[in-house]
Image (cartoon, rainbow, N blue to C red):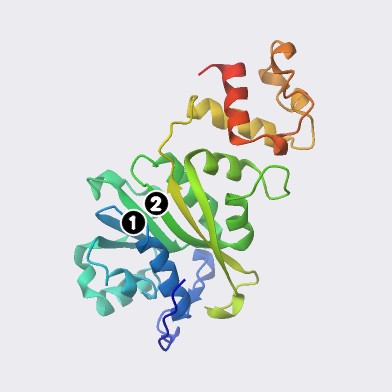
Amino acid sequence: MEKFYLSAKKSSDVRAKKHLGQHFLNDENIAFNIVNALNEKCQTPDILEVGPGMGVLTKYLLQNTNFKTWAIDLDKESIAYLQTHYPQLENRLLEADFLALNFDNYFKDEFSLVGNFPYNISSQIVFTLIDKRHKIPLMVGMFQKEVAERLGAKPRTKDYGILSVITQAYFDVEYLFTVPETVFTPPPKVKSGVVRLMRKNTELGCDPKKFKQVVKLAFNQRRKKLSNAINSLVQDKSLITEFADKRAEELTVQDFVRLTIILLGE
């Protein structure tokens, strides 16, 4: 990715709050690269930044006139800071909970998602993205490294699980780069990873709710063979002979689609 160097903004202007999972990025080069990863693929008229903090990403987002930048944060201190330093956001700066937001009230068309996501709600953000995928075709975000790796994990690996399967069912996942602890204030205890998720153009092939039910049940007892792990859904074991002796971590997304159709229909 491109390199872009500026002096980092001091992080003393807004106090990081532990209960909000805040760790403020203070490396301008990384901030630029995150926004650049969004710019490379973004085709929506709007983007929404989650948890902008003091605007380390916001200032680069606002430079792109191909889309309108929105920002949402629960932190009153961050909202006040952004109102002062980025007045061009105008009424597109929302003091609200992303997880509870009614997107239709703000976005008539599709929008993209970007952010240095708080660790404490990162999985919930991904599942919200998946639930609202008809509205959000693209996301670029920073997560705790192990969560970022889980999103794109392959079958037969320790990181492959419910989050991997359900995310990859609907999105193509790219792990872009790793971010060290030292570029945050305060520094977290773990490394971070930046990923890009692009919505797939193909349909899943089965009912999404049934698919999610099967995936969750299979991984809830991931050490067991599927014949035992999903026993509550199996009326005729001869129907799942192909999968019976396998464990959940061995199945691809398409395997889970086929299993869902066998057990619960399309």
Q: Is residue 136 left or right of residue 22?
A: left
Q: Residue at x 39, y 75 (%)?
A: 56
Vertical order, 188 against 71 (above or below): below
Earlier in the chain: of badge 1 and badge 2, it is 1
Q: Residue at x 44, y 71 (%)?
A: 33
Q: Residues within 10 Å of mark 2 (few under 14, many from 20)?
A: many
- Give the labeled residue for mark 2: 138
Q: Is residue 102 left or right of residue 201?
A: left
Q: Amino acid at mark 2?
A: Leu
Vertical order, 215 against 125 (above or below): above
Q: Residue at x 40, y 72 (%)?
A: 53
Q: Amino acid at mark 1?
A: Cys
- Give the labeled residue for mark 1: 42
- Asked which secondary structure carries label 1, the reply is loop
Q: Position of residue 142 (x, y in %)?
A: 50, 63
Vertical order, 7 against 73 (above or below): below
Q: Quadrant of residue 42?
A: bottom left
Front residue of this view, candidates 21 and 158: 158
**Residue 59 at least partly seen:** yes
Q: Is residue 221 left or right of residue 135?
A: right
- Asked which secondary structure carries label 2, the reply is strand
Q: Position of residue 93 (x, y in %)?
A: 27, 64
Q: Position of residue 200 (x, y in %)?
A: 44, 41
Q: Position of residue 80 (x, y in %)?
A: 30, 74
Q: Residues within 10 Å of mark 1 (few under 14, many from 20)?
A: many
Asked whether disc 1 touches disc 2, contact meaning CB atoms under 8 Å apart, the reply is yes
